[in-house]
Image (cartoon, grey):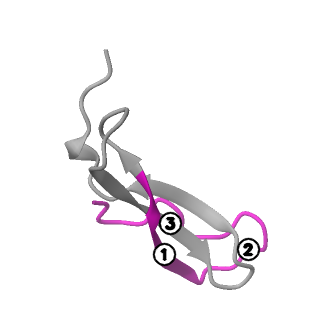
């Protein structure tokens, strides 16, 4: 996972209160018809609520694109 935040300021309101959120009910799956998935991590502005960045929690679990 990331050691430093890729976003430090909201591009919409200029706020610097960056918060972390998770989405686990809509998983990104490894296989086309699989149940195994990966949670999505969000960076959210604490001032205006804008989603500033999103990524999967464990990118190393995905197969390499061909």
**x and y percent of residue 37 in the render?**
31, 52
Q: Disc 1 or 2, which lies upstream in sequence?
A: 2
Kind of element beneath mark 3: strand
**x and y percent of residue 35 in the render?**
30, 49
Measured in 3D between alpha carbons, the distance from the residue under mark 1 to the one under mark 3, in whole angstroms, is 5 Å
Q: Answer with left or right where residue 6 lies relative to residue 18.
A: left
Residue carrying label 3 = 42
Farthest residue to the right: give it: 13
The disc label shown at residue 14, or none: 2
Q: Disc 3 or 2, which lies upstream in sequence?
A: 2
Q: Answer with left or right where residue 2 lies relative to residue 23.
A: left
Crowdedness near tag 2: few (<14), some (14–19) or many (≥20) residues, C-alpha within 10 Å: few
Crowdedness near tag 1: few (<14), some (14–19) or many (≥20) residues, C-alpha within 10 Å: few
Q: Which dot, 3 or 2, sits closer to the camera?
A: 3
Kind of element beneath mark 1: strand
Kind of element beneath mark 2: loop
């Amino acid at each position: 996972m990331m050691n430093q935040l890729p976003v430090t300021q909201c591009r919409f309101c200029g706020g610097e209160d960056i918060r972390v959120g998770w989405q686990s009910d809509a998983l990104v799956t490894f296989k086309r018809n699989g149940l195994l998935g990966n949670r999505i991590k969000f960076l959210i502005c604490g001032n205006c609520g804008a989603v500033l960045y999103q990524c999967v929690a464990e990118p190393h679990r995905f197969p390499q694109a061909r």
